Image (tube, rainbow, N blue to C red):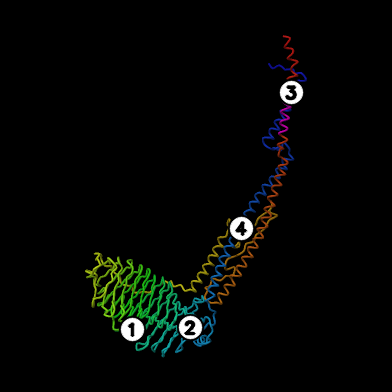
Amino acid sequence: MLHNVSLNASMRANLLSLQQTSKLQDITSNRLSTGLKVNSAIDNPSAYYTAQSLSDRASDLNALLDAMSQGIQTLKAVAETIDAASGFLQQAKAVASQALETAQPIIASVATEDELLAAVNSGKKGLIVVNGEINITNHSLQLSAGQSLVGSRYIGIDKNSKLNFNFDTAENAINLKNNSIISDLEINYTAQAPGGKIISLDGGSATIRNITASLDTSDTIAGSDVGMFGAINGADLRLEGFFNTKAEGYNHRMLIASGNSAVTIAGNTVINHTGQGTIIRGIEFYDQSTLNIESGCHINFDLNGTGTSSYLGIYMNNAIADITDSQITMRLNGNKGEALAAGRGVGARINIRGNTRLNIETDGENCYGLDTWNSGQINIYDQADINIKNKGGSSYGLAVYLSSSDGKEFPASINIFSPDVKMNIVSDIMLMFRENPQAENSVFIASGSLISWKTPDGTTQGVWQSEQNNKLTASGSQDIKGFDGLDGFSNTGGQASDIEDLPADLTTKTETGQTAATAEGERYQELIRQYDALIRDGSYKGVNLLRGDSLKVSFNEDSSSSVNIPGVDASSQALGISMSGLTNSDEIEKIIVELENAVSRLRSFASLFGNYNNILSTRQNFTEAMINVLEEGADKLTLADMNQESANMLALQTRQMLAVNSLSLASQANQSVLKLF
């Protein structure tokens, strides 16, 4: 049973004070622990809900701030893309400007013989474009300096351009002058008299590129040589690109040079030449002329001789040929064929360098693979690969000898200067070696070199290695079949290499030839392709403002305040940049203007998007400031003043201590009663 406890008035007053102090301490402690003076709607409904509203808006603006930030990043991606894209266009302009230095304007487009002759006879510098097929009889085209004759493909039109020449006099079909170009034409030449050539350069510099040609000479022509392409009197002629040529008849050459002329077959050029008839040659040079075959060339000669007259693949007569990193394939069908020959005049040289591959096949009596005489030299370097297959009788893989011609007081030689040279010979006789009483003919074979030889029927064969640098000199007339018994050579015991017959079709199909103009045009086109690829890659989070996409960025909660950023089309096509080649000055000047306009438009795009970037940056700064204002306002409504609350807690603790002491004093009267007992 619970009994009521009676407290005096003083004690009750002190107890009530303690209870009130405790409640105030609880409130102050809660504010100190949470930092808030309004924790719920119960504490202060007006302040609580007002602060909640301010905080909610600040949160909404924070979400919009993220969108603004991503919008700015999108514009930064655009700026970076425009900077890089402008670099591509400036580079393309530089390529076009470089091409303009050597390009020529179009002065005429011709479709008839009269139009062609009138254009040529005008003497104007520039391009004469052959539009279609033109027949020309007994008219030689005498180009002027700086005047060029080209087909439609040269200016980017996919259409055949053909010239058919018919002569009954000894005339060249086309005579070039300094800075002339012949390109992208099919030329057919029928000659009824000796001495004419399809294209000839007399002094000066000129270029022939991308030609399909046929030469038909009468079997009764005698006297001067007939050629397809010729250079005389110090001319500097350059062949570039892709050539398919065919010659039939008597006494013709694919390429001929004399009079200290220079001919360059440019890197990666392809020449497919077929010759048929009597006294036929592939390449024949005289009079201190030079031939330079640059790396990557493919030269294929398929020569079919009739009668007993000799015929040649490549012949240097007092001339020099340098062949580097190229592939040369020659098939000679007929008697007295010589594939690679140097001789007669002082200084006749053929130098084979780099990774050149030489494939030779003859199918007749008395044929030669590599042949030197009367001062001629064939020098083989580096990693050259020489394959010679003579299928007929009395034929020689290598030959060094003295003829009855001039220059007999000078030695002839074949020299293998590198142990990395590969030489494989299939022939009745490996080496025909003849003594020169006036000078010392020789064969030099570097130490470590391997030479493989076998007869066509395979009855005799061997592989020999040179144990030292060997220089062989002839002692009388010698037909050497292997090096057995010769000092300085060891028979390896290996099997001589088989050499397969050349394919029926020697044509190199791939048009690997790159002309200077084509290369510049392709460099330009590649830059434009890279420009377009860059524009496509300039997106951010799936939005590409340079490909026509648009972007909307909202600035407030209900999107009543926003900005719409429209996209642009910055592709090369939209900017009016053409993808044609750099083939003539008119076209190149137009392209340069297009590129300048395109760069100007890109700059205007950059200015446009820069303006939008300023708008977004300003709104971003404003929104950040507004969020701070809203959050500060909410905090003022709900946050406790920690200094004040700390002071309150200290005061309450003091009050509590005093109340406890007062309660103790109030209870002393009751304690006095205990002293009575």
Which residues lie in the magenta part? 646-660
Q: CA distance from mark 4 to mark 3?
A: 71 Å
State left or right for residue 92 relative to residue 411: right
Residue 311 placed where, x, y %? 32, 81
| The image quarter in which residue 677 lies | top right
Task: Assess whether residue 659 is covered by the magenta stretch.
Answer: yes
Q: Quadrant of residue 532?
A: bottom right
Q: Which residue is mark 1?
A: 279
Q: Is residue 574 left or right of residue 28?
A: left
Residue 15 numbered mark, or none: 3
Q: Nearer the viewer, mark 3 or mark 2?
A: 2
> Would you say the residues marked 2 and 1 are in contact, meaning their CB atoms lie under 8 Å apart?
no
- Residue 534 makes an appearance in the image: yes
Quick one: label 4, few (<14), some, or many (20+) residues within 10 Å? some
Image disc number at residue 514 = none
N-term mark: 2 or 4: 4
Q: Give the mark, 3 or 2, whose residue is nearer the N terminus.
A: 3
Q: Amino acid at mark 3?
A: Leu
Residue at the spot of label 2: 177
Q: Is residue 603 above or below residue 372?
A: above
Alpha carbon separation for disc pair 4 and 1: 73 Å
Q: What is the secondary structure assignment of the residue under circle 1?
A: strand
Question: Hey, what amino acid is under mark 4?
Answer: Lys
